[in-house]
Image (cartoon, rainbow, N blue to C red):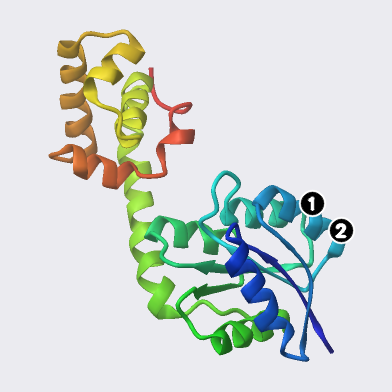
Amino acid sequence: MVTTVFIVDDHPLLLHGLEDLIARDPGYTVVGSALDGRSAVTRIRQDLPDVAVIDLNMPGFSGLDVAVELGREALNTRCVMLTAGASQGQLYDVVMAGVAGIVLKEAAVGTLLTCIHQVAAGGHWLPTEIVGEALKVEASRRINWQKLSSRLTKRELEITRLVAADKPYERIALDIGISKGTLKIHMNNIYRKLEVASRAQLVQLAAGQTGSSVRTGRE
């Protein structure tokens, strides 16, 4: 049985290169492609390929966004994520979104085809050397964040979100309408409650976690 494949990548040269490489194998048929995530979701809904090969780091609507949307709609299309380099947080989110395969862009085309074959057959391609450490470390970090962040007030969570977004302290104070001295007091309380000793440690702990938490802090 021929496996139908849809390809998503925001770089036209890479997109067409992947199309050509996959199409050369008689076991696969490329049924479509897209240069951005939103268009990809629309096309995948229509074409219902067996496998979607998706670039993770696309601007705007990312590969993770595509995978989450497809998972929400419970389509039969299974996702393989391509990445030139993903953070531990990204890898964790991708696996939690139900992505069935992850392949590094530097891998040989044979690796990608083997991954697609295994995923199309109902299996997974999540190499331990790529995702193993990320899942363990990231799960621990997020559990720790949930425990410690529950100590913060809503204002402290708001400040933490802005700090994690790399905003300068002067800008944070201006944005939320407080003095630099008051901000310093808040930061001292945040450091104490989160059990961190520096801005870098705070950012590492809170990375990717503050968006939804701002709405759940204590008064």
Mark 2 = which residue?
46
At 48% from the left and 26% from the top, the residue drawn is 215
Q: How many marks?
A: 2
Seen from the viewer's position, the closer of residues 150 and 63 is 63
At 69% from the left and 79% from the top, the residue drawn is 20
Kind of element beneath mark 2: helix
**Amino acid at pointer 2:** Gln
Residue 206 left/right relative to 96: left
Q: Is residue 57 above or below residue 81?
A: above
At 36% from the left and 31% from the top, the residue drawn is 161
Q: The N terminus lies in which quarter of the figure? A: bottom right
Q: Are marks 1 and 2 in contact (CB under 8 Å)?
A: yes
Seen from the viewer's position, the closer of residues 69 and 136 is 69
**Amino acid at pointer 1:** Thr
Q: Position of residue 15 (x, y in %)?
A: 63, 67
Q: Position of residue 17 (x, y in %)?
A: 62, 75
